Image (cartoon, rainbow, N blue to C red):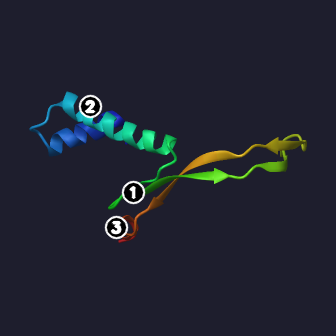
């Protein structure tokens, strides 16, 4: 679902807030998630799940499958999401 579609759905469900305010609230929400992840803090939204940073270790030797060449892969961070128990139950009903 795209950002404009989410804002449209929110507007339908809550008609007393205008689109500009909904858009600003949504942007602030997303920016807070981004800022927390940049600071390596996890974000838990109880009914949805948890966003967190997972550090991937460096690999001194890996192989490029296309060329067969050995390459070095530096350590990096990945964004991970773990669904809440409630969300898993709702999806699997």
Residue 75 is situated, as x and y percent measured from the top left of the image, at 71, 46
Q: Which residue is mark 3?
A: 90
Nearer-N-terminus badge (1/3): 1
Secondary structure at badge 1 equals strand
For this orientation, the residue located farthest to the top is 20
What residue is drawn where x is 11% and y is 39%? Answer: 15
N-term-proximal mark, 1 vs 2? 2
Tell me the number on the disc at residue 44. Answer: 1
**Quadrant of the snapshot with the C terminus:** bottom left
- What is the x, y in percent for residue 12? 16, 41
Residue 44, image x and y in percent? 39, 57
Question: Which picture quadrant has residue 74?
Answer: top right
Front residue of 48 and 5: 48
Q: Would you say 92 lies left or right of 67 here?
A: left
Task: Quickly name the residue at label 2.
Answer: 24
Determine the residue positioned at 67% across, 45% down: 76
């Amino acid at each position: 679902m795209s950002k404009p579609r989410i804002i449209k759905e929110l507007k339908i469900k809550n008609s007393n807030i205008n689109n500009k305010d909904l858009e600003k609230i949504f942007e602030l929400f997303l920016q807070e998630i981004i800022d927390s992840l940049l600071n390596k803090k996890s974000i838990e939204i109880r009914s949805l799940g948890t966003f967190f940073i997972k550090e991937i270790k460096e690999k001194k030797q890996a192989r490029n499958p296309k060329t067969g060449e050995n390459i070095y892969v530096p350590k990096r961070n990945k964004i991970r999401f773990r669904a809440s128990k409630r969300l898993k139950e709702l999806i699997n009903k």
